[in-house]
Image (cartoon, rainbow, N blue to C red):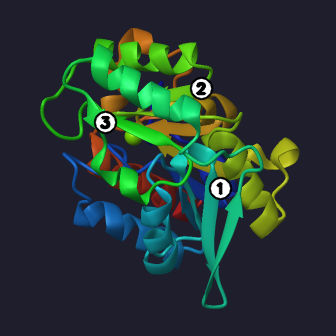
């Protein structure tokens, strides 16, 4: 990983889309700092298309698409994308997304709660359509990453997909991820061609559920806390910020916009 300050001006000027994870990328200690939210407005005012790409639920995405200065949002780790168009909410669902009352997902919930003491169903579960979120670190008791890995193993034994974020293990049926839905949304809304123009995307993330994005986009950025994941990550971002979480995101956006203004 190179420091984000090393981003060159040509790469900065090629960016049209800025995608970002939310938890522990835009947020710090569970809160959205003013600097982080302001960075979204700076992107908006610079004519760049900002799109949060999150494991958070459909209910949150409805609010984000309507109220935040963004071009859309991908939620539930790629099950859905929402955006606002001419004052109306538009919704795109992945064709492989299966509702979260599926018997396999219900069995996973029961097994995780029995076999990994202290874990619990996330409090945002009521807003979810397609996945189950098992909380290991959003609220107390904070469990170690090894417990998150045990939960993930249970999910996979039962034939589901599982991803570990900084706070939850999310599990779902169907082969989709943050990357596949992000590409679909950009193609649908902006005629984005992923084969030709992946260098027009900057992505910010912080944890293993962001790895498909880190691997795919040449201009991927980790906020400093991405380093916590050590051996758990195979695909690291190209760049890293000096600051953690929301301050790191704001730092990365500031560097991007400054470099775009520089005269070469
Ligand atoms: Mg995160």
Residue farthest to the bottom, as pictured: 87
**Relative height, residue 227 to residue 29 (above, below):** above
Picture quadrant of ligand 1: top left
The answer to which of 201 and 96 lies nearer the viewer is: 96
Mark nearer the N terminus (3 vs 2): 2
Q: Residue at x 68, y 46 (%)?
A: 97
Element under disc 2: loop
Residue farthest to the top, as pictured: 231
The answer to whether residue 235 is left or right of residue 31 is right
Nearest to viewer (mark 2 / mark 1)? 2
The answer to whether residue 66 is left or right of residue 186 is left
Nearest to viewer (mark 3 / mark 1)? 3
Q: Residue at x 66, y 45 (%)?
A: 98
What x and y, as percent, mark residue 146? 31, 12
**Relative height, residue 210 to residue 53 (above, below):** above
Marking on residue 15: 1
Crowding at dot 3, Cα within 10 Å, few <14 / some 14-19 / many 20+, comes out as many
Q: Which residue bears the numbered disc 2?
A: 160
User: Can you tell which quarter of the image residue 90 is in?
Assistant: bottom right
**Relative height, residue 64 to residue 86 (above, below):** above
Can residue 223 be seen by looking at this rendering? no
Crowding at dot 1, Cα within 10 Å, few <14 / some 14-19 / many 20+, comes out as many
**Relative height, residue 87 to residue 58 (above, below):** below
CA separation, marks 3 and 2?
Answer: 19 Å
CA separation, marks 2 and 1?
Answer: 35 Å
The answer to which of 140 and 199 lies nearer the viewer is: 140
Q: Residue at x 22, y 49 (%)?
A: 30
What x and y, as percent, mark residue 20? 49, 51
Element under disc 3: loop
């Amino acid at each position: 990983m190179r420091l984000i300050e090393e981003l060159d001006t040509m790469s900065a000027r090629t960016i049209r889309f800025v995608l970002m994870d939310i938890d522990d990328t835009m947020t710090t200690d569970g809160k959205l700092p003013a600097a982080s939210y302001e960075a979204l407005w700076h992107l908006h005012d610079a004519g760049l298309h900002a799109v949060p790409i999150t494991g958070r639920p459909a209910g949150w995405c409805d609010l984000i698409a309507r109220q935040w200065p963004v071009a859309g949002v991908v939620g539930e780790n790629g099950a859905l994308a929402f955006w606002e168009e001419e004052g109306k909410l538009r919704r795109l669902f992945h064709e492989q997304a299966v509702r979260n009352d599926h018997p396999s997902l219900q069995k996973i919930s029961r097994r995780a709660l029995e076999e990994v003491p202290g874990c619990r169903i996330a409090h945002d579960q009521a807003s979810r359509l397609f996945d189950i979120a098992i909380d290991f670190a959003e609220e107390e008791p904070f469990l170690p990453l090894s417990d998150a890995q045990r939960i993930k193993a249970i999910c996979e034994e039962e034939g589901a997909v599982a991803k570990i974020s900084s706070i939850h293990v999310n599990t779902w049926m169907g082969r989709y991820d943050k990357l596949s839905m992000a590409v679909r949304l950009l193609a649908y809304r902006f005629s984005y061609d992923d084969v030709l123009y992946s260098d027009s995307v900057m992505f910010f993330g912080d944890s293993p559920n962001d790895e498909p994005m880190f691997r795919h986009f040449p201009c991927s950025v980790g906020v400093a806390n991405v380093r916590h994941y050590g051996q758990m990550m195979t695909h690291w971002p190209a760049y890293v910020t000096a600051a953690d979480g929301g301050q790191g995101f704001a730092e990365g956006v500031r560097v991007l916009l400054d470099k775009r203004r520089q005269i070469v």
